[in-house]
Amino acid sequence: MIYFCYAIIKPTTVITESLKVADKSEIHFGRVTELLPRLLPECRVVVITDANIDRRYHALLQRYEYIMIGTGETVKTLHTVDTIYRRFIEMGIDRSCFVLGIGGGIVTDVAGFVASTYMRGLRFGFVSTTLLGQVDASVGGKNGVNIDGYKNMVGTFTQPQFVICDVEMLRTLPEREFRAGMAEIVKAGIIADRELFETVEHSTLESLREDERLLDSIVMAAIKVKADIVDRDERESGERRKLNLGHTFAHAIEKCSSEMNHGEAVAVGTVMISHMAVKLGLLQAEKADRIERAMERLGFRTSAPVETKKLLKAIAKDKKSVADSIYLVLPIDIGHCEVRKMHIDEIAACTE
């Protein structure tokens, strides 16, 4: 269900550290109360959010007109998008307006997709309120929704005008949701930042939650990995595929089971693909074991909740598949990966 509320805008103050993505989008690190008034354009703003954000940050939301969507992957659909379109028409939202997504990855995916497609495109920005959202979903310009449980089968490449990452907002996250974001940070380290991986490898979940300076540094490092790759390949024709490390198996897990959230599935998928890289002779077994231990140290389960046969069937219908093959991201070292096109039968042989 979608809810609607109304209000007005604005204070002012100062911008802190920022990072540019693809020369189109800026990621800002700092307090949302300081950043948001400076970053929002002087126009009508409509917020897309959910009930969790309304409960925790109602004082922030009530400054704007806002629309609330439900929570969970089941609301990340074209039905939700259609409902928002219809509400926009009722509200008289037009191209002069600005869409602001405040929430986790589901909210920002839906808000970005709606803004990218309504009236052929409105300006939009995000306040990312989850660790998973800050280091992955809200950054890079991918906006999409699911079809029949298949992840992000319909979407766009459109950059938000800005993304605000305020680690202070992560204090309200349940432990499971915080942990989910850590899988994406480990992933970023494996792709292109050995030091980031080693920092997390030698930390506990508790220390990462409690040390704001440490958390700030690893969030910024993970986003920098993504931003650097997106700068080189915004529309995922080559280099950007590396950001899918662990996600081929993860999306299959999410399709076949409701037992794991996205971050938990990414942790399993990353461990699976690491051991697969060992079988292919690309990665030393000791390094695959380090990846698995790092995930376990953070509290992740590292085995899939469904049999591999079911996962392979789902992988064959993944949006990244081409005929009977799919582009897989394989770690060749901590901090280095390669993309390889593999036939489904090859993948099956390596996962036996």
Image (cartoon, rainbow, N blue to C red):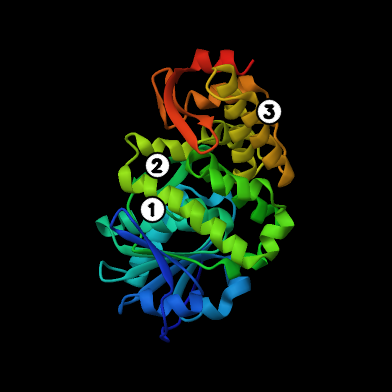
Earlier in the chain: of badge 1 and badge 2, it is 1
Q: How crowded is mark 1: few (under 14 residues within 10 Å), some or many (20 or more)?
A: many
Which amino acid does the dot numbered 2 rest on? Val
What residue does disc 3 label?
Answer: 306
Residue 5 on image: x %, y %: 49, 75
Distance Cα–Cα, label 1 vs label 3: 31 Å
What residue does disc 2 label?
Answer: 154
Earlier in the chain: of badge 2 and badge 3, it is 2
Q: In which quarter of the image is residue 288?
A: top right
Where 339 falls versus 6 (above or below)?
above
Q: Quadrant of residue 263?
A: top right
Residue 301 on image: x %, y %: 72, 38
Res. 106 visible in picture: no
Instruction: Identify which residue, 322 or 52, lies in the foreground.
Output: 322
Q: In which quarter of the image is residue 279?
A: top right
Which amino acid does the dot numbered 3 rest on? Val
Where 178 falls versus 162 (above or below)?
above
Who's the residue at 38% across and 64% down the image? 162
Q: How crowded is mark 2: few (under 14 residues within 10 Å), some or many (20 or more)?
A: some
Secondary structure at numbered mark 3: loop
